[in-house]
Amino acid sequence: MIVNLITFSSFLHDRDSIKTSHEAILTRLEKYFTLNFVDSSEVAKLTPDDFCILFVATGGVERLLIQYFEALPKPVIMLADGMQNSLAAALEMSAWMRVRGLKSEILHGELSEIVKRIFVLYNNFKAQRKLYGARIGVIGVPSNWLIASNVDYLLAKRRWGIDYIEVPIEHLCDYYRQISDDEIGEICARLALHALACHDASPEDMLKAMRVYKALQRIVLEEQFNALTLNCFKLLELIGCTGCLALSKLNDDGIVAGCEGDLQSVFTMLAIKILSGQETFMGNPSMINTRSNEIILSHCTIGLKQTEQFMLCSHFESGKSIGIRGILPVGDVTIAKCGGECLDQYYLATGTLTENTDYRNMCRTQIRVHLNSPVSYFLRNPLGNHHVLLQGNYETLLNDFFQVNACLRIE
């Protein structure tokens, strides 16, 4: 792991004296990382894929920060051990950035904590680089009831480097009609074999759902999408088939796929997948109990790999096509949502999945979660409808990532 130390030092100090002054911290850091010293005047030579920390080596360098600020990687992470008035300079620089609404952080104190923090920052940096340039397909416009889940494409690109690419849903329908039964027969048979049961899902429903899956696969390949969201109700209107099973299969393939054209939730799912390597479940908060501090999340699709068992049912709202009732393992979970038109806010909570419920008047996959933080957030200050659940406790990992990217935590 290479750490580029962009070195800010006064003209009164040469490189050898700087290394001598900070020998204690540099020698110990070199046990964990390969250090590459880069003079502040050469910062423009670094690439966006170079992981960098601003090494404040002496005092009197505050004006150098202003001089080279535009070329520095953001947010600015500063390392200052206190020798040669370095901490004093770092504090002044941090205050200059703060009053301008800019994010910065100073690494100082116990070396073991500094090392841990550098590893966290490095993982966040790698996730940011993977997000940068990511292509999210929007198949059909977002569902018209998602009035609080819009994303400003330009602002999202400026903040995260992602691109939302719209694809007419008619394009998907054209590909759907070109797929023969022979192309999907084996997949259908294998899926039916592994299902615990099939309720109200006919062989014809299965064939239609797999045609949608194959058509979406083709679009993903052609457009090089990293993720997609589908206006599944519009699809149901056009061809009489939901996207539930197709989206489930795509998630199992490693392609992040969300429902209803929800732009915020699909970004959340993609960010979590890059950070944790885990697949997620996008659900509706369908029941909230403030007394027991529990919530039930439900939806008609989930990646089959996230389940212990699954049943193929009809889609809840329409009673048509195929929905999935997944049975998830009990245990620790994390619920998250990145929201706002430029994706600059987030909700994050941990809890315990205690039960897979079976209410008749809810979407097919239903899970009861006891939260570790007040469930009243959903009633008083929610970031919209859909929220995203992943199995395991990832609060620290996700919180560090969103905080480094200057997002506001909503509670």
Image: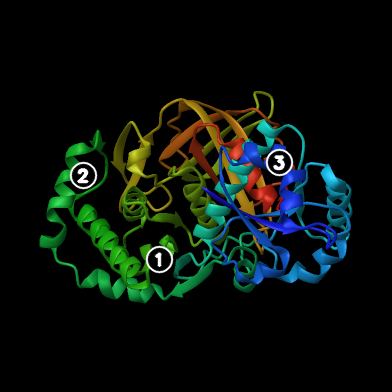
Of the image marks 2 and 3, the number of the one nearer the N terminus: 3
Q: What is the C-alpha distance between the residues marked 2 and 1?
A: 25 Å
Q: Left or right: 138 with respect to 28? A: left
| Eye-nearest disc, 2 or 3 | 3
What is the quadrant of the C terminus in the image?
top right
Relative to 346, is 305 on the left or the right?
Answer: left
Any part of residue 77 in sight: no
Q: How crowded is mark 3: few (under 14 residues within 10 Å), some or many (20 or more)?
A: few
Q: Looking at the image, which is closer to me, 246 or 318? A: 246
Mark 3 sits on what residue? 23
Q: Is mark 1 on a helix, strand or loop?
A: loop
Decide: few, some or many residues near mark 2? Use Cα within 10 Å; few <14, some 14-19, many ≥20. Answer: few
- Residue at the spot of label 2: 191
Q: Which of 228 and 159 is in front in this view?
A: 159
Mark closer to the chain start, 2 or 1: 2
The amino acid beneath tag 1 is Phe
Q: Estimate how packed mark 1 is, as few (under 14), some (14 to 19) or many (20 or more) residues with alpha carbons within 10 Å.
A: many
Residue drawn at x 13%, y 55% as measured from the top left: 185
Q: In which quarter of the image is residue 175?
A: bottom left
Q: Position of residue 8 (x, y in %)?
A: 77, 59
Residue shown at 37%/68% (left/top)?
Answer: 224
Considering the numbered disc 2 on the image, is that residue within a helix, a strand or a loop?
helix
Label 2 – label 3 distance at C-alpha:
61 Å
Q: In which quarter of the image is residue 308?
A: top left
The residue that disc 1 covers is 225
Three-letter code for the amino acid on which mark 2 is drawn: Leu
- Separation of marks 1 and 3 at Cα, in angstroms: 47 Å
